[in-house]
Image (cartoon, rainbow, N blue to C red):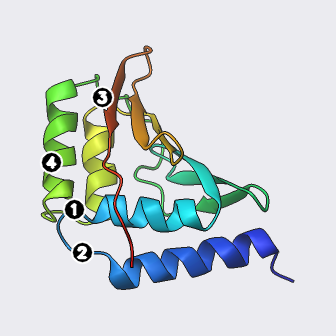
Amino acid sequence: MTSKAILNLETAQQKAMAGRPKSGGFPYLAETLRRAGVTGNEWILPACESLYLTEDGPVVVQETPLISGTVDVPPFNRDALIAALRADQAGESTFPQFLRAAWDAGVVRFYVDFIARSVTYYGCRNEIYSEQYPSIEIP
């Protein structure tokens, strides 16, 4: 049996993907998840493991990993990360392409705080880059 947390998360994700604009879609997705009781989301790269913290309980999603085998971790490159973010925000990349670009920029994990409306990206040597995203209204 599927848990209430999983059903709620999947329903919110489907709703968000159906209504999200191509450009600037992340705030729409984030607000939809926030309204559904998702408080945080941590992505671990390159495994593409995503942990959602919800009011109904935590849910983990395992996507297709970005790498296999043993590889060097790319150095943290703030400018490359910002370029990947801006391309994604403009609708010029898919989410899997964004994840790959973030990894290539040295991001090993990132955390979305849906309450504070912020995303923080981390390199393996405690490098940090954080951005706020705008509050939006969803009809």
Q: Which residue is mark 4?
A: 86
Q: Are marks 2 and 1 in contact (CB under 8 Å)?
A: yes
What's the CA distance linking mark 2 and mark 3? 31 Å
Nearer to the camera, 88 or 33: 33
What's the CA distance linking mark 2 and mark 1? 6 Å
Closer to the chain start, of discs 4 and 3, is 3
Q: Are marks 4 and 3 in contact (CB under 8 Å)?
A: no
Nearer the viewer's eye, disc 2 or disc 3? 2
Nearer the viewer's eye, disc 4 or disc 2? 2
- Above or below, 91 against 3 in this view is above
Residue 63 appears at what percent x and percent y? 52, 63
Give the residue at x 28% y 23%.
76
**How many numbered discs?**
4
Residue 85 appears at what percent x and percent y? 21, 46
What's the CA distance linking mark 4 and mark 1? 10 Å
The disc labelled 1 sits on which kind of residue? Answer: Gly
Element marked by disc 2: loop
Closer to the chain start, of discs 3 and 1, is 1
Residue 99 appears at what percent x and percent y? 34, 51
Closer to the chain start, of discs 2 and 3, is 2
| Quarter of image, res 131 | top left
The disc labelled 4 sits on which kind of residue? Answer: Arg
Q: Which residue is mark 1?
A: 24
**How many other residues sit within 10 Å of disc 2, few (<14), some (14-19) or many (≥20)?**
some
Quadrant holding the C terminus: bottom left
**Residue 52, label in figure:** none
